[in-house]
Image (cartoon, grey):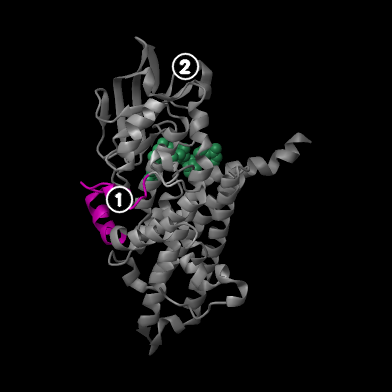
């Protein structure tokens, strides 16, 4: 671990440069956080470039994560989980993100579905799906977005119609994280178009069952470890036991987890900023130009100091939102602020770290290009940056609208 000479002990460890870089204030709160940091450094970081090139995680999938205890983090211990708080789970995904935000997102999406099944699922659904998800043999995915409904998420046109005591699903889902290898799909489908969002229900659909057609994963700017792609459903029959959330509860269920997802993305952005800053500092203290270390140019120092400030602010915002979420307090606004701020901070911060490294920062020999693609991705996942502004503006104007 690097010891930063600028450490200001009088402000407490949390506010020292070392504390900001290593998130050290939290390091001893839950043993899984340290374990995730080690797993990230020893397994995720060395494999990330390969996943990026090959366009997915490959054969072993998330099993190594499961062995490290990273599947079922929010699940109660009697269900085989870690019984962690949402804050602690987010520290874990932040640590993974330092190695690869794409991998961290895979793990988050999977854990999120496990948590939904543990919370809302029937005893039969828990028994059927949780063991294989805990072992990493079955990867989970969340299927809300469609071609015509991204931000306008209630405009779901995939249909589920009742037939013979079960349901028949037809339609197409796009932008599905984990699509390349997912075994279990939580599918949001419209059961009665006249009811709008109240008609949306959520079904647990096995990806290898008849009527499910997996599409070729997308080629994107980056983040290929996520294996993002689409699914088509053609007369896909499921029985009543596959309903996770009945009509009326489906869309509410999707929105219930959105604050956690947004705060989590914000913390993952902190992870890629911290990693980029560390790489840039190491590089700039070794590289020489005009007879001196480039780190001794004040312009460059200030560029990196701004990244450290943004990282500090983004982390405080992320975990303030998490604190509210774990306390059961309203968190919509803090989560929207955190996601918007951290996304922008990561975009600028990673790019500035890259710039400080000259042309070398642009090479795939360093992780910054991967991190920058993930910072861009943060603008879309779990609601665009503009949608965070829609949420914040609505709240800003509320008192004036009443008058
Ligand atoms: C890597 C990746 C993984 C993803 N994984 C998943 C997943 O697992 N499951 C899933 O369901 N979805 C997933 N998504 C989809 C994601 O949730 C959507 O991309 C997002 O909701 C935005 O929808 P859209 O792309 O259709 O953009 P649109 O909604 O078409 O928006 C286009 C532009 O218009 C802006 N805009 C839209 N409405 C407003 C408004 N009211 N005010 C101001 N501006 C507005 C947007 O901000 C954006 O700039 C993923 C996306 C990516 C990139």
For residue 68: magenta? yes
Q: Nearer the viewer, residue 294 or 166?
A: 166
Q: Furthest residue to the top?
A: 164
- Relative to 297, residue 108 above or below: above
Q: Can the viewer see residue 231?
A: yes
Is ligand 1 less than 8 Å from the beta carbon at label 2? Answer: no
Q: Which residues are magenta?
A: 45-71
Q: Quick check: 56 above or below 113?
A: below
| Relative to 64, 331 lies left or right | right
Find disc 2 in the rendering and name its residue: 192
Residue at 32% from the left image edge and 37% from the top image edge:
131
Q: Nearer the viewer, residue 281 or 287?
A: 281
Residue 79 in the image, given as x and y percentages of width and height = 40, 38
Secondary structure, mark 2, is loop
Foreground tag (2 vs 1): 1
Assign the C terminus to one quadrant of the image: top right
Ligand 1: give its quadrant.
Answer: top left
| Residue 351 seen in the figure | no
- Which residue is tagged 1? 67
């Amino acid at each position: 671990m690097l010891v930063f000479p600028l450490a200001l002990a009088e402000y407490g460890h949390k506010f020292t440069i070392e504390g900001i870089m290593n998130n050290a204030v939290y390091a001893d709160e839950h043993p899984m956080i340290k374990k995730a940091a080690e797993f990230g450094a020893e397994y995720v970081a060395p494999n990330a470039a390969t996943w990026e090139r090959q366009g997915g995680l490959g054969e072993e999938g998330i099993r190594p994560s499961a062995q490290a205890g990273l599947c079922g983090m929010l699940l109660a211990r009697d269900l085989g989980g870690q019984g962690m708080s949402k804050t602690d789970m987010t520290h874990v995904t932040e640590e993974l993100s330092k190695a690869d935000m794409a991998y961290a997102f895979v793990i988050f999406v999977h854990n999120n579905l496990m948590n939904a099944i543990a919370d809302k699922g029937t005893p039969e659904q828990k028994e059927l799906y949780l063991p294989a998800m805990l072992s990493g043999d079955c990867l989970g995915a969340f299927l809300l977005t469609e071609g015509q409904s991204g931000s306008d998420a209630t405009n779901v046109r995939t249909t589920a119609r009742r037939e013979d005591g079960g349901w028949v699903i037809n339609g197409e889902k796009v932008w599905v994280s984990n699509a390349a290898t997912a075994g279990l799909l939580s599918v949001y489908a419209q059961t009665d178009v006249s009811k709008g969002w109240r008609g949306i229900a959520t079904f647990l659909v096995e990806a290898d069952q008849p009527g499910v057609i997996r599409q070729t994963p997308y080629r994107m700017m980056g983040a290929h470890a996520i294996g993002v792609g689409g699914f088509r459903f053609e007369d896909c029959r499921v029985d009543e036991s596959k309903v996770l959330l009945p009509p009326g509860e489906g869309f509410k269920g999707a929105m219930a987890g959105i604050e956690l997802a947004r705060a989590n993305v914000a913390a993952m952005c902190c992870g890629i900023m911290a990693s980029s800053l560390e790489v840039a500092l190491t590089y700039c203290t070794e590289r020489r130009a005009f007879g001196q270390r480039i780190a001794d140019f004040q312009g460059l120092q200030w560029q990196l100091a701004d990244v450290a400030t943004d990282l500090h602010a983004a982390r405080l915002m992320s975990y303030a939102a998490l604190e509210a979420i774990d306390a059961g307090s309203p968190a919509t606004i803090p989560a929207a602020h955190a996601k918007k701020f951290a996304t922008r901070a990561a975009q600028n911060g990673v790019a500035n770290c890259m710039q400080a490294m000259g042309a070398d920062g642009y090479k795939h020999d360093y992780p910054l290009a991967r991190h920058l693609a993930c910072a861009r991705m943060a603008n879309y996942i779990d609601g665009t940056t503009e949608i965070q502004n829609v949420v914040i503006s609505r709240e800003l104007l509320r008192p004036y609208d009443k008058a």
